Amino acid sequence: MADLTIMGAGIFGLSLAFICASRGAHVRVIEKRSLGAGSSGGIVGALAPHVPENWNAKKAFQFEALRAAGAFWQDVAQQSRHDPGYARLGRVQPVADSALELAHARAKSAADLWQGFASWQVIPAADAPGLAVHSASGFVIHDTLSARLHPRRAGRALVAALQAMGAEIIFGPGTPSGPVVWATGHEGLADLTRDLGRPIGGGVKGQSVLLRHDCANAPQVFVDGLHIVPHLDGTVAIGSTSERDFTSPDSVDAQCDALLARAHAACPALRTAPVIERWAGVRPRAQSRAPLLGAWPGRAGEYVFNGGFKIGFAMAPALAAIMADLVLEGRDAIPEGFGFDGV
């Protein structure tokens, strides 16, 4: 018999399984489709911070999650003997002339809020590391807090680590035992909405593009909402769209071409890079946009671990530790705004 069952083998479910197994629990993971079948099977993997201003509890929690991510993924790599593709290589962002003063002000606030762990600097674009980036002002922001993770490698590494630790991983039908944690993405949010009779959240489709271009040690680039993320396997991921209305969850269309055109304009070196994949999937988005975790209202012994729209990979390990406290020890340390009180 399992001490707990986790429904869903995405980044939230697998991170929770790893934390619980590390604490000695017998864990069963049941995934009805395939590893990372939802948004966790994507290609982008940008772990980026909130802007260092207007600080609040959510931003502070994400900062701590980013600071702790390296140790978590190093542990996964050691347990699994698989490289999850994590590296804290920073991020480069072009700055408009009208935003230069604000960018310098944020550099000062980052020096305080990021506690010396990482920096936010405004530098000439010509001095930026990695891919050459077009900037109309001639300046870019270079932060050293952002990191990258290879989503698919991370999922495989977590599964291998869990198997090495004696956890059960079931793909297809399976029988839960013990407490059950539902980490089932946008479908799980839809189930909650139906069960509770009020809007809890839903899905937002994203499309992205993968290029063959080897710059594995370069920082990621962020331009007006567009992520350009070099990975260790000689690829560069470009993403993503945000589509609230869609008919097909996994089809790609001309919006991928628009992403590619924007990436070419931002980083001219990518214009000759061949496209090797176009991907689409649906990301879970709670009403509050924050992750959603806690006991499922009205269902004894059942829990929810979901949401994390656009920040799931960055937040999952830290949130998993809080969920493990709740499920294994009955200790509720859920941050304000991350529970059902926030939706």
Image (tube, rainbow, N blue to C red):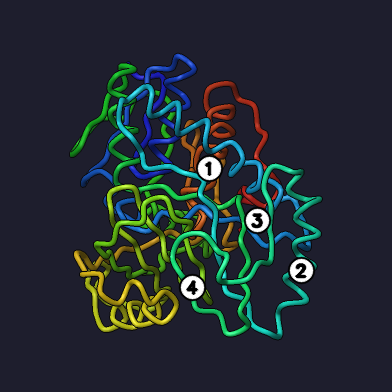
Pointer 2 local density, CA inside 10 Å: few below 14, some 14–19, many at least 20: some
Foreground mark, 1 or 2, reads 2
Q: CA distance from mark 1 to mark 3?
A: 17 Å
Residue that appears at 30% across and 77% down: 271
Mark 2 vs mark 4: which is more N-terminal?
2
Q: Which residue is mark 4?
A: 133
The kind of secondary structure element at disc 2 is helix
Mark 1 vs mark 2: which is more N-terminal?
2
Foreground mark, 2 or 4, reads 4
Give the amino acid type for the residue marked by disc 1 in the picture.
Gly
Pointer 3 local density, CA inside 10 Å: few below 14, some 14–19, many at least 20: some
| Place of residue 214 in the rendered image (x, y in percent of width and height, measured from the top left) | 30, 57
On residue 298, which mark appears?
A: 1
Q: CA distance from mark 4 to mark 3?
A: 39 Å
Seen from the viewer's position, the closer of residues 91 and 153 is 91
Foreground mark, 1 or 4, reads 4
Q: Which residue is mark 3?
A: 342
Give the amino acid type for the residue marked by disc 3 in the picture.
Gly
| Place of residue 300 in the rendered image (x, y in percent of width and height, measured from the top left) | 50, 33
Location of residue 105 by image quarter: bottom right
On residue 104, which mark appears?
A: 2
